[in-house]
Image: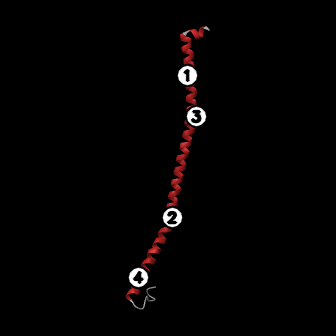
Amino acid sequence: MDSQTRDPDAVFERFDSVIRETMMQLHRSRGERGQSELDRLNWELERDEMRRAAEERADVSKRAVTEPLRATLRSAVTRIDRILEGTSSNADGATSEDV
């Protein structure tokens, strides 16, 4: 055995050196993985924000189309109700004014 392997201080220094190098490598590796994980999370966040914005735009567009249709349907149903009320009270049926 050489003198380094018998000297407790030398063994400790070598052991300490190896541990420090290993910890630095681990830290670098975690940093790279951490950065890629951070990039992935940022990408997911951006994707979710874009999806929400698209859904909001679709909701606004849908409301812009459906609200006038609903108003038209309500008006038609009201007119039909009036016509039906008139026909039930008249034996002759609806007049041209009801239509």
Q: Residue 32 carries which label?
A: 3
Q: Point out the tag, 2 or 1, that comes first from the N-terminus.
A: 1
Residue farthest toward the bottom in the current orientation of the protein: 92
Cα–Cα span, label 2 and label 1: 61 Å
Q: Which mark is residue 62?
A: 2
Counting labels gives 4
Regarding mark 2 in the picture, which secondary structure is present there? helix
Do the residues bearing badges 3 and 1 touch, measured as CB atoms within 8 Å? Answer: no
- The disc labelled 4 sits on which kind of residue? Arg
- The disc labelled 2 sits on which kind of residue? Lys
Q: Which of 6 and 44 is in front in this view?
A: 6
Query: Of discs 2 and 4, which sits in the foreground?
Result: 4
Q: Which mark is residue 61?
A: none
Cα–Cα span, label 3 and label 2: 44 Å
Residue farthest toward the front in the current orientation of the protein: 1
Regarding mark 1 in the picture, which secondary structure is present there? helix
Is disc 1 surrounded by few (<14), some (14 to 19) or many (20+) residues within 10 Å?
few
